[in-house]
Every structure is written in C-alpha cells, then in structure tokens.
C-alpha cells in the first residue's frame, strides 16, 4: 500500500489583504534604516542645512569696519613702520654721511639698526663679488668694533658719558658707507699698489671723520677727547679697508 502524506495547504496572500493568508504566515521583514550618527556625539551632530542657513544669513566675522562686517585696512600702519623700518630716515642718515665736512647729527638722534644692516649686507655682497667669502669675519668685526668704541668712549668721558651701545652700533654702521663705496670701486681698480692704498686712505679718513663727528655730537663728554675718539674710529675702518685690499 502506498503511504499518503498530508501536505498542508499553501495560501498565497492576496493583493488587497496581505493578512488574510493565515496566522502561520511570517510577516515581511522591514528593511533596517541606514546607520544614523548618534546625536550624543558632539562632532557628529552637525546639521548641514542649518550651517548653510547660518552662513548665508550673514558673515561669520564682523570686525571693525565701515562696510558692515568687512574689516577696514585703511587705518592699519604699513608693515615697515610696524617693524621699525623707516626708509625715509635711513636715506636721510645715509645722505648726512656723504658730506664728511658737514654731518647732520640731528637725524642720527633716533638710532636704528636697519640702515647699518643694509650697509653691512652690501659690503658682504661686494666682497662676495670680489671672490671673498667673509660674512662671518665681517659680522664678528662689526660686533667687536661697536663694543670697542663703546668702551673707549665711556672710559674717556667718565661719568659724563651717555653713549649707549645701540647708538654706538648705529653710528659705526652708518659710517661704514665710505668703506662700502670703496669695496664697490675696488671691483674695477687694480689690486694692490700705491694707488690702491691711497684710495683706501681717502675712504678711511672719510669714514673716520664722519663717525667721530657723530659720536661727539650725540654723546656728552666727547669734545675734550676728540683726537682719541678719532684714533679709535681710524683703527676700526682701517681693519675693514684691509679686508678690501687683501
């Protein structure tokens, strides 16, 4: 005899009523929504729509200015003035050294180091064009020369001397202009010989006179020791001129 198996009836849900198939029909799985960032995390609770609305409503930064939130840069000082670099004063001080017989010491009362650094770099550049790499030597001699003149003057003037190191460095730097000119001319002059030494002596005397006049005019107590101050300045610029000659 053949065995008969009871097959349960299969009921398909109708389009109108999906629950009419019977209680044994499994319900459809609802698709899980994609991962949503937790609102408790501060850096992930950012709404792009609200951010766009806030940025479009007005500028983020509203600085002091005329046009609403735009900053006004007309009232800002130039960058060189903020750095303490005044090209007009530098040019006035350089022109005052060009005439060794009438040095205008009033423009040198406000000492600075921008002009001396410019002249030092020019001197190093001319020496480099002559095939002499002497950046370290020139920098060391500048520091030693400024300290040397500062110590000599204050020892001669005593308690009446009021020359500070900043002013001394500025005077030594601006008075380097004749030596810088001599370094530029030496590129076209024959090296060595009596003629070269005579030209070097002229520029050294020029720098010595200019620096002596500035030191005596800017500081108190130097009139009585002008000769000794001039001798110290002469030694300083002779050393620099020897770098050019040899």
Image (cartoon, rainbow, N blue to C red):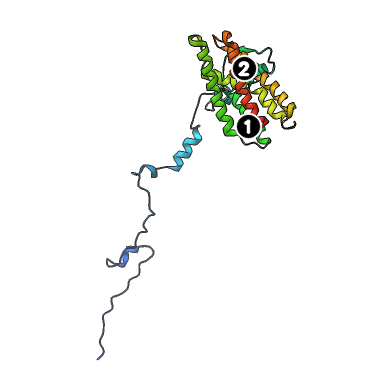
Q: Secondary structure at mark 1?
A: helix
Quarter occupied by the N terminus:
bottom left
Whether residue 108 is visible? no
**Which badge, 2 or 1, is on the more N-terminal residue?**
1
> In the figure, is residue 191 to the left or right of 55?
right
The quadrant in which residue 76 appears is: top right
Q: Which residue is mark 1?
A: 124
Q: Nearer the viewer, residue 175 or 106?
A: 175
In the rendered image, residue 166, in percent from the top left (x then y), is placed at 53, 20
Q: Residue at x 68, y 15 (%)?
A: 100
Q: Is disc 2 placed on a helix, strand or loop?
A: helix
Residue 106 shows which numbered tag? Answer: none
Residue sitting at 60 percent across and 23 percent down?
Answer: 236
- Spatial CA span between label 2 and label 1: 20 Å
Residue at image point 64% right, 30% down: 243
Between 236 and 211, the one nearer to me in the picture: 236
- Asked where in the image residue 105 lies, by quadrant, the reply is top right
Q: Label 2: few (<14), some or many (≥20) within 10 Å?
A: many
| Residue 25 rendering spot, x and y as whole percentages | 30, 67
| Image quadrant in which the C terminus is located | top right
Q: Position of residue 43 (x, y in %)?
A: 39, 43
Residue sitting at x 57%, y 20%:
170
Q: To which residue does mark 2 refer?
A: 211
Q: Would you place residue 120 above or below residue 18 in this image?
A: above
Residue 47 visible within the image: yes
Residue 5: where, in percent of width, then height? 26, 82
């Amino acid at each position: 005899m053949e065995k008969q198996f009871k097959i349960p009836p299969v009921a398909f849900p109708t389009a109108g009523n999906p629950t009419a198939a019977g209680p044994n029909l499994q319900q459809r799985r609802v698709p899980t929504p994609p991962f949503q960032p937790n609102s408790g995390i501060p850096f992930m609770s950012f709404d792009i729509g609200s951010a766009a609305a806030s940025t479009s409503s007005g500028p983020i930064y509203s600085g002091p200015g005329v046009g609403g939130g735009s900053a006004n840069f007309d009232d800002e000082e130039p960058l060189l003035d903020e750095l303490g670099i005044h090209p007009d004063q530098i040019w006035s001080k350089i022109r005052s050294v060009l005439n060794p017989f009438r040095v205008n010491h009033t423009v040198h009362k406000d000492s600075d180091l921008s002009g001396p650094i410019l002249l030092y770099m020019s001197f190093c550049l001319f020496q480099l064009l002559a095939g002499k790499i002497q950046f370290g030597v020139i920098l060391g001699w500048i520091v030693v020369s400024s300290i040397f003149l500062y110590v000599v003057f204050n020892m001669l003037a005593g308690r009446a001397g009021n020359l500070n190191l900043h002013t001394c460095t500025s005077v030594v730097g601006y008075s380097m202009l004749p030596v810088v000119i001599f370094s530029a001319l030496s590129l076209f002059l024959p090296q060595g010989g009596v003629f070269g030494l005579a030209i070097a002596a002229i520029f050294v005397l020029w720098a010595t006179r200019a620096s002596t006049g500035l030191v005596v005019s800017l500081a108190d107590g130097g009139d009585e020791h002008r000769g000794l101050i001039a001798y110290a300045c002469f030694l300083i610029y002779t050393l620099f001129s020897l770098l050019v000659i040899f």
